[in-house]
Amino acid sequence: MRLPIVKHSDDLGVLGVNLVNDQITEMGHIFRENTNRDFGVDGQIEIVIESSGERNASGRLIAVQIKCGDSFFFS
């Protein structure tokens, strides 16, 4: 029985999503990864608005496509 092949690009994809999640969370907003068939949309960012000491989810969404790896910087 052949074992599944784990490609380096799969690892990079996970690293890219984790990086975006960490950065958006650090900025105080909400990141939701799209785990379904996405056809280019890897996740959504929901803007959090802070007012009078309260943080509120705004309902404003930004769809994001995440790319990770050297080839996206040196092409």
Image: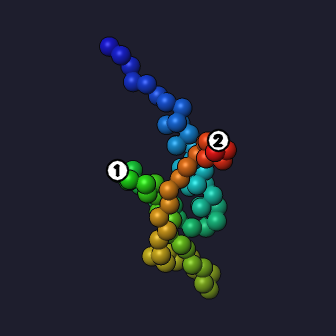
Where disc 1 sits, the SS reads loop
The quarter of the rendered structure image containing the N terminus is top left
| Residue 44 visible somewhere in the drawing | yes
Task: Provide residue 34's location: percent of width, then percent of height.
Answer: 41, 55
Label 1: which residue?
A: 37
Left or right: 35 with respect to 29? left
Where disc 2 sits, the SS reads helix
Q: Is residue 17 above or below residue 60?
A: above
Q: CA distance from mark 2 to mark 1?
A: 25 Å
State the residue lying farthest toward the right. 74
Q: Is residue 2 above or below residue 36?
A: above
Disc number for residue 6: none
Check disc 1 and give the amino acid type: Arg
Disc number for residue 70: 2
Task: Provide residue 64's location: percent of width, then percent of height.
Answer: 50, 60
Task: Provide residue 4's location: percent of width, then percent of height.
Answer: 39, 24
Query: Nearest the camera: 39 or 27?
Result: 39
State the residue lying farthest toward the left. 1
| Residue 33 visible somewhere in the drawing | no
Query: Nearest the camera: 75 or 58?
Result: 75
Circle 2/circle 1 CB separation < 8 Å: no
